[in-house]
Image (spheres, rainbow, N blue to C red):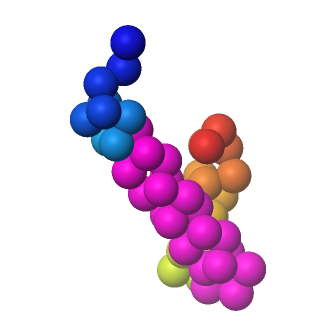
Amino acid sequence: MMSLWDALRMNMMISYQELVRTFLNVMCDQDVQFFSGICTINKFIPW
């Protein structure tokens, strides 16, 4: 059985991944040249 602490850590990790994905998608949509490499990499990360 999963402990409350494990569930909380998993929830925080998922929230962090969503935050990073949202930030990178916004940066990619704006075609910022500095982030173009990160945007390309982000499309292959199966989050």
Q: Residue at x 65, y 39 (%)?
A: 46
**The one of 39 and 1 positioned closer to us in this rendering:** 1
In the displayed structure, does residue 5 sit left or right of residue 46? left
- 30 shown above or below 23: below
> Could one spot residue 14 in this view of the protein?
yes
**Does the segment drawn in magenta span residue 15?**
yes
In the shown orientation, is residue 6 left or right of residue 25? left
Q: Is residue 43 above or below residue 34?
A: above
Residue 36 lies, in percent from the top left, at 61, 71
Residue 33 belongs to the span the image colors magenta: no
Residue 21 picture location, percent across and down:
58, 61
Task: Please state, as top left, top right, bottom left or bottom right, where the C terminus lies in the image.
Answer: top right
Residue name at image x 43 percent, y 45 percent:
11
Taking the image as shown, residue 10 lies to the left or right of residue 17, namely left
On the rendered image, what quadrant is the N terminus found in? top left
Q: Which percent across, then down, holds residue 44?
A: 67, 44
Q: Please, is residue 23 above or below residue 32 in the view?
A: above
**In percent of the image, x 61 and y 79: which residue is there?**
27
Q: Which residues are magenta?
A: 10-32
When the figure is inspected, residue 31 is found, relative to residue 16, above or below; the finding is: below
Q: Residue furthest top?
A: 1
* Residue placed most toward the observer, 34 or 18: 18
> In the figure, residue 25 lies in which quadrant?
bottom right
